Image: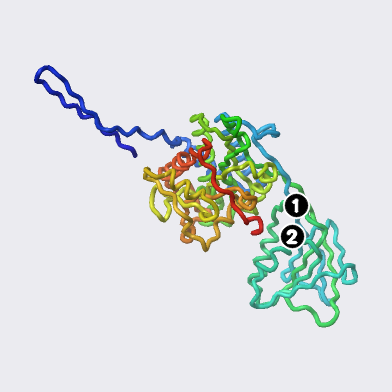
Amino acid sequence: MVKTIALVLLLGLSGGSVCAQKKPVKRPAQPGVAAATVERVVRALAADDMQGRASGQPGGEKAADFLAAEFQRIGLEPLPGLPGFSQPFPVYEARTQARMVSVGGTVVPPARFVLVSGQPTLNWMHYDEPAPRIVTIGPKDNLLKEIRPLLNPQANTIVFVDTMQKAAFKRVAGFVARGGLRPDKPAPFSTLLVLGNAPAGPLKFLVTATTDIRTVTLRNVVGVLPGLDKERAKEQVVFSAHYDHLGILPAVAGDSIANGADDDASGTTAVVALAEYFKQQHSNARPLLFVAFVAEEIGGFGARHFSQQLDPAQVVAMFNIEMIGKEAKFGPNSAFITGFDKSDFGPLLQQNAKGTIFRFEADPYPEQNLFYRSDNATLARLGVPAHTISTDQIPTDKLYHSVNDEVESLDLANMTAVITAVARAAAPIISGQQTPTRIVGEEAKK
């Protein structure tokens, strides 16, 4: 906090003269983001009635409505081409119900196979052309890594999994049974996983099943604060976070709602508070885009769609904000920036914070690969200086992705300080005085 140094007046009475000597006075810093807005928004997003904000579920839709209303209240404008603050896009859910699986003339029990198919009606036999690809997973192979691409089939495949992988196989079966959303309509192919060895000799099999394919509409929430300098109209600055979380989890002590207060109601609150702050400042030369992404937790589909609706060459910086509800390992009034070595975005924020009590540090957890685990990665791969700002001590965070990630676990004062520091450090970028260097070479890292 900047302290005001009082004027010291020296009064001389001899000869009736008055002599005044002034010491330098430091101006108080501009007001920060509104603490009341921070608390109100984070409590609303993490409330039980949001049901954990799962993508495609009623709680997620309620959160999107709330955020659109906040952007309306603040006075933002819709993204050009959209009638409102919602940016809708389709995703797909496919649920397969196997009727019968036979391999080598023997019916396979349901607990020993997993079937994923994009075909509404499946009658698949060994003499069908083309012949399926056969994959074998050994006892020491990484089952989850090997079969991840096969769960979105692009060719007919049969996978035989060593029985030593029984526990991992059960986890895969549970994941598939829960179903999930995917960004692209399923291709007309199937993957069959069988727990056991392939039979000797020519492979004979029969698989019959039906698959229900459903289209689900998800939506990002996007608001725009137009720039005041028309010559910089194609120099956008993005402030983003994801508003989705996990929804409902198995109950722990009677609580089944994964409120996601830190992950990422805290970051989404920052986006709202920053929009309010910059609207009141009325000094941004560059246009500002405020984005609350959907579907980060299930694959980053929201960021992917958003990136396809704009020209990445016109985005000069992206401030993605993720989990800022607790103190960083560097102590209060600090945050870290992922991908610190990939552009000069981080050093610029450090420079802009000099003379304040706040510190921006490099990501202290490089082994966690955080740069690629949030929505910034999608735009970074397109060359945008897109980085995530966070405070989470993720290696030791026991509340992460649990039903205990609630508002009561947050440090709201420190969270408000983080958001205020982002607002002030961003000022030279949104005014056009600074432009971070582009990220090079990330497009190859998928």
Asked whether, in this view, residue 85 is left or right of residue 435, the answer is: right
Q: Height in image: 192 above or below 418? A: below
Q: Tell me, what colour scheme is on the image?
A: rainbow
Does dot 1 land on a helix, a strand or a loop?
loop
Q: CA distance from mark 1 to mark 2?
A: 9 Å
Q: Position of residue 330 (x, y in %)?
A: 40, 54
Q: Quadrant of residue 180?
A: bottom right
Q: Which residue is mark 2?
A: 152
Residue at 29 percent of width and 34 percent of height? 4
The quarter of the rendered structure image containing the N terminus is top left
CB-based contact (under 8 Å), mark 1 and mark 2: yes
Asked whether, in this view, residue 439 is left or right of residue 122, the answer is: left
Asked whether, in this view, residue 56 is left or right of residue 186, the answer is: left
Does dot 2 land on a helix, a strand or a loop?
loop
Residue neighbourhood size for the residue with mark 2, other residues' Cα within 10 Å, grouped as few (<14), some (14–19), many (≥20): some
Q: Position of residue 274 (x, y in %)?
A: 51, 37
Q: Residue furthest top?
A: 16
Q: Which residue is mark 1?
A: 184
